[in-house]
Every structure is written in structure tokens, then in C-alpha cells.
Image (spheres, rainbow, N blue to C red):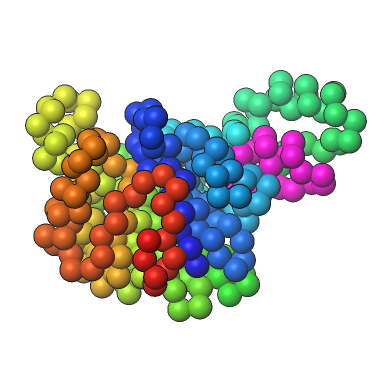
Amino acid sequence: MQVVILGSGNPLPDPLRAGPSTLVRTAAGDLLFDCGRGVLMRAAAVASGAGAFKALFLTHLHSDHITDLNDIFTMRWAMSFQPNPLPVFGPVGTADLLRATEAMLEPDIGYRLAHHEDLRWRPSSTVTEVERGVIMDEGGVRVTASPTDHAPVRPTVGFRIDEEGQSVVVAGDTVPCAALDELCVGADVLIHTVVRRDLIEEIGLPRLTDVLDYHSSVADAAQTAARAGVGTLMLTHLVPPPAPGTEQEWIDQAQAHFDGSVVLATDLLALDVNHGP
């Protein structure tokens, strides 16, 4: 199993960091977790794409985590040569999101159907709204969902992927909570969104300091990893984005609370589970 960070950024556009998105490559196929800004451009760099995704998993419906859902939905349809519904797993509200996305794209769907004689079907998806428990078990790959805490964003979920004794957890946006601890127990890799509390407090803008009460700090994520006995903690969705030369500060903050390996995500960083980056 391999983890590829397609986007390590946050809601603010960044020329070096695409929006939040993680690809987990398994024997059952490529599993995509969240689909932030630029996801298909990054996927193309690792020879994947909309038509190749086994399934899309959404941790929550904040805009920065679903920015490019419409691109995946359209490209999977327009570049397939037979009906190829997009399987989507996400929290309650995901089905409404897919219906709204299709409705938004209705003019484009009409244009393409009118222009391409060999395109005789509409784009489609199969949506499974999830909260807790095993949601996929196929080809030796099991995906488990668990509630997280990103209030007032509700509901939100984290995901655990298990394959042949290897395990990866994609936490999404959350503060520390018991359900996430439970999901992470013994995981080889925890991919956790984080904010730098010290830098945000120093900047002091209310719109920015507001994020502190519903995201995990670097220390929070490290303590979650330590409690659960995780092997490697990968920090992503970095707020604010690390200034050049300050990357080690993030790692040092995590290592003050966690004895395992700490990795600071960058776009297209690939990590072979149990073998490191």
C-alpha cells in the first residue's frame, strides 16, 4: 500500500500546494480521499485520474475538500467509453451534494451529449452515506469509517484503510476525540490536518484565529498519534503554509509529543507503508 499526497494545502490558493487530497494506492485500486483544488492535475502526475479512481471518500463537505468534485464527476464521464458511475462515500449530505453538482453541470452535460455522438449516457454516481463501521471490503482491502469532531461542521468522518497487515488513517479536519483515537489504534500511518497555533495567534486576525477551535494543532495531532501507537504521523493541510526554511519547526513541535516518525507533507510526496517516504 502506498500513500500519495496530491494536495497538502489549505483553503487559501498556493502555487506550491494543491487543495486537500490524498491518494491511497491499494491492490483493489486507487482510493481518493477528499478532492480539493487541483486534484486531477496532481493525479495526472502520478498516472492516475478520474476514470481510475476505485472510489472517492469525503471526510466532510467544507468547500476546500470538495472544490474539484465537479471536475472528477465530469472527466470520469466524458473520458470513459461506457457508463462508469463514480462511487462516493461520505457523511450525511453527500447525496445532496452530488445531486447539486450534477444540476450545476446540466448545461455542460447537454453540450457534450449534443456534440459527441458516441456519448449516449449521462454522468452518474453511486453514493453511500456513512458514519461508522466497515464501508468497503474488497480484494483484501477494508475501509472503515468513524465520526470525528469538526463542529459546527457536522457530520464529519475519518477513514482507516487496512490491507495485508498494513493500515493508514485519513483523519480529515477534526479536533482530538475518542472516536478518532479508536480508529487510529496501531495504524502504520496517520495523515492528519494541522494548524500552527503559535503562528496563528501571532498573526491575530479574527478570521484566522477562528480556525483554532475546530482544527487540531501540531501538538494535538502528535498526541493523538502517541495515544494510538501510530508508526508514522504525516502532517498535511498546513495552516499557515510553512515559510521556506521553517519546515523543521513543524516536525520539532510534533516530536515533542510523539516518538514515532514525523513527515511534513508536500504535494506528490509518496510514502510506501512500513517503508517510509
Q: Considering only vertical position in the picture, is 149 above or below 201?
A: below
Residues in magenta, as a range: 72-88
Between 243 and 178, the one nearer to me in the picture: 243
- Left or right: residue 237 versus residue 203 is right
Between 252 and 161, the one nearer to me in the picture: 252
Q: Which residue is drawn at 36% across and 70% down?
A: 188
Between 22 and 102, the one nearer to me in the picture: 22
Q: Which residue is drawn at 50% across and 35% down?
A: 38
- Left or right: residue 259 versus residue 2 is left
Q: Considering only vertical position in the picture, is 14 above or below 24?
A: above
Residue 32 is situated, as x and y percent measured from the top left of the image, at: 53, 51
Q: Considering only vertical position in the picture, is 57 above or below 7?
A: below
Residue 130 is situated, as x and y percent measured from the top left of the image, at: 50, 55
Residue 5 in sight: yes
Residue 169 is situated, as x and y percent measured from the top left of the image, at: 39, 62
How many labels were placed on the picture? 0
Does residue 138 show up magenta in the picture?
A: no
- Left or right: residue 21 versus residue 72 is left
Q: Which residue is drawn at 21% across and 59% down?
A: 222
